[in-house]
Image (tube, grey):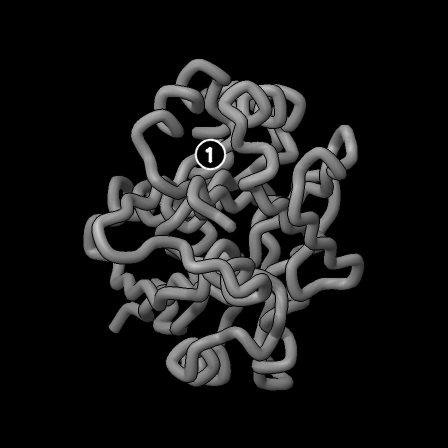
Amino acid sequence: MKGTLYGIGVGPGDPELLTLKAVRALGEVDVIFAAASTKNDYSTAYSIAKPHLKADVQVIHLGFPMTKDERELKAAWEKNAQEVATVLDSGKNAAFITLGDPLTYSTYGYLQRTLLATNPDTRLQAIPGITSFHAAAAKVGLVLAESKESLLITSGVADAAKLEAQLDVADNAVILKTYKNFDEIRSTLERLRLDDKTVLVSQLGMNGESILMDIKDAPKRPHYFSLALIKKNRK
């Protein structure tokens, strides 16, 4: 019988912010797959999950190139999917670990899609994780939404015009991946008079954690692990 691949969200950074189900699965699987850059094999997700792994678990780093070349990306996904399929075909259970939640802006989503396209009988189970924005809101005591309010979850990679249109109709918002186009994001928020309604959180639960209650105080280029929480009626 083929093994099962668990897509496990390991939370935003604190090893204690994993669900009981995630911890149980991590302690039982035979193989751990962790995403890494093709330039090195370091994985933040692995460093978070490590305290919960059994001593003899096999760890395989899957390289994902930082490129926009679709052919290169497609080749990498297919290569990684085949490596995962080979392990599952041997009857071993495995886990692909990812920051936050496996189905929210995660590399697991691409892997899942590729596996099902190339190996339709793959056995998959996603185990949800605590997202960075939920943990950030808890850290600063910010209510993300209540009553009839709407909450926008968007990517900072989007262009300024799209972001402005989204913010125009949302009561509150979360902008993930803010490091990429931060100058544009900050300019957009200032133009909409939301700069003092925005909290910038970086490296949550990690060394170097930073919380800025006004993005006017933010550096020109924040850390890779940064997000913004926006509450229009924030007092």
Tell me which amino acid carries mark 1: Ser
Look at the image and tell me whether residue 174 can be seen. Answer: yes
Corner quadrant of residue 59: bottom right
* Residue at point 62%, 64% (across, down): 13
Q: Which residue lies furthest to the top in this view?
A: 161
In front: 226, or 214?
214
Q: Where is residue 5 in the image (x, y as percent from the top left)?
A: 36, 64
Q: Is residue 167 left or right of residue 206?
A: left
Q: Dot 1 corresponds to which residue?
A: 155
Q: Where is residue 188 in the image (x, y as percent from the top left)?
A: 54, 21
* Residue at point 74%, 37% (across, down): 218
In front: 175, or 215?
215
Number of dots carrying numbers: 1
In front: 225, or 232?
232
In front: 103, or 32?
103
Q: Where is residue 161 in the image (x, y as percent from the top left)?
A: 44, 14
Label 1, secondary structure: give it.
strand
Corner quadrant of residue 65: top right
Q: In which quarter of the image is the N terminus?
A: bottom left
Look at the image and tell me whether residue 98 can be seen. Answer: no
Q: In the image, is residue 191 above or below residue 155?
A: above
Q: In this view, does 170 lie to the left or right of 130?
A: left
